[in-house]
Image (cartoon, helix red, strand yellow):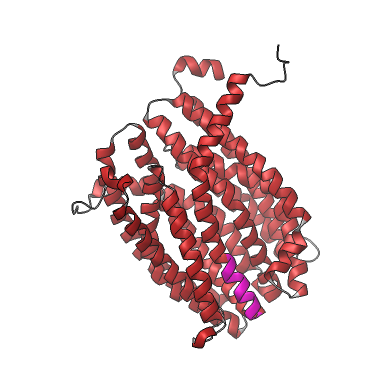
Amino acid sequence: MPSANQTPPTLRSAVLTEIAALWKLAWPILIGQLANTGMAVADVVMAGHASAQDLAGVGLGVSIWNIIVITLIGMMMSVNPVVAHHVGAREFDLVPHVVRQALWKALGVGSLAFLLANASTLVFDLLALEPLVDNVARNFVHITSFALPAFTCYRVLYGYSASLNQTKPIMAIALGALVLNIVVNWLLVFGNAGMPQLGGLGCAWSTLACVWFNLGGLLWWMHRSPAYRSTWPFGVFEAPHREKVHSLIRLGLPIGVTFFAETSAFSLIALLVARFGSTQIAAHQIALNFTSLVFMVPLSMGMALLTRVGHSLGAGDPAAARFRAWVGVGAALAYAMVSAVAMAWFNTQIATLYTSDTAVVSAAATLLLLAAAFQLSDATQVVTSCAIRGYKVTRAPMVVQLTAFWVFALPLGCTLGLAPAWLPWHPAEPMQAQGFWIALAVGLSVAAVGLTILLRIVSRDHLPAITRLKVA
């Protein structure tokens, strides 16, 4: 007989089967996400080897870009659970209408984001930036803003494709965009092959080209693949339906705010530490860039988990949805343990890959140690939040994330990092970027605990009454 500590073979088999199914859906998303993040890595590495000022300017520009783009990703994610529920319920005829209305929403939101991005450059007027840093940062945002309407439409088609279990096209197109990004950066950042030498601004033109490439590539793939024929959204023209667009906005806006809460906490640090010089900005950007790369694994698992949970709920099986949710959380935690150890062990070597500036390497290596400390919390909060969205619950996670990052992380970060004299308590000297990253660890821990509790409540409440009594 098995001992009390052994997992029953049937449960072990079910867990392994679910992990395999989750990974089958997640790994193409992961490759695509790594390719997208690889473009940011290429931008930072090439800008860093152009000059510290180019790196700092690109870092500031990317900070604004990330806040806007990641918020848009959240807002466009409303299509994911809706399509996943229809697919799980075998209601394929309802999917095209959802996608068409989501694209109308994307055009409106993307156009508004274009205006907001250009207006956001006014924040640089408040910072005492070096002239070259200011020029690169400001123009980076202006150039990349023209990609935002294409980006929102691409994210709708991305969510539609993922909800149909078609994740390999996303991977292939993202890899193509990565190659394009590296080539355009090589040509424009350094002025190779007779092209103008634009420094950090070459990264902006590369980003613009890659976003439009992603949209065109996915449309081309969808048109040629039979996997999309039963739900093809472009067979007829359909004007925007106010009620449907509004329902998608109501579902997506809390997700967008949730994404904004987290990414703004990371990206605003670059603006807040700008007063301490290019070294601190560059070190923060390196640490943020690498942790974003590592973060792609739990994020991809979370996006796959959203689809898995949505399919189960659409099929009328809340018990399977709950089981899938917690298996996904456990798998993400196992990965986070490995990434935390690796990041702490190789922190200096990682920083050296980005720049040869010894001062920047030293500062970035310290930040990477702090990043290693919050790997478990970061993985937990992203996977649990995605699982909760699979239940079409979006407002409660928003409240948790806003509390974690805007009530805990940012105020604590300003206290430790800036040490304002008017506070009753503050460090004797500003801890600069290190203080902010310590605060991020606190904020992510608060988010992880809150979202884990919320997932337990939501998943239990969707069970039949008699089952809820057994799991209470």
Q: Main secondary structure of the magenta part?
A: helix
Residue 124: x and y in percent read 54, 76
Q: Is residue 227 visible?
A: yes
Q: Is residue 114 left or right of residue 344?
A: left
Q: Is residue 167 left or right of residue 261?
A: left
Question: Quick one: 272 or 348, which is closer to the camera?
Answer: 348
Question: Quick one: 180 or 207, which is closer to the camera?
Answer: 180
Residue 389: x and y in percent read 46, 40
Q: Is residue 416 above or below residue 385?
A: below
| Quadrant of residue 12 within the rendered picture | top right
Q: Is residue 393 above or below residue 464?
A: below
| Quadrant of residue 93 within the rendered picture | top left
Number of callouts: 0
Residue at point 34% right, 36% down?
A: 87
Q: Is residue 158 left or right of residue 190?
A: left
Q: Which residues are magenta?
A: 41-51
Residue 455: x and y in percent read 53, 34
Residue 342: x and y in percent read 73, 52
- Asked if residue 230 is among those painted magenta in the image, a careful observer would answer no
Residue at point 37% right, 42% down?
A: 164
| Quadrant of residue 447 within the rendered picture | top right
Q: Is residue 270 left or right of residue 429?
A: left
Q: Is residue 203 visible?
A: no
Residue at point 44% right, 75% down?
A: 143
Instruction: Tell me the quarter of the image containing the C terminus.
Output: top right
Residue at point 60% right, 47% down?
A: 404
Question: Quick one: 376 or 17, which is closer to the camera?
Answer: 17
Please identify the residue farthest to the right as the structure is shown.
428
- Asked if residue 48 is among those painted magenta in the image, a careful observer would answer yes
Instruction: Tell me the quarter of the image containing the N terminus.
Output: top right
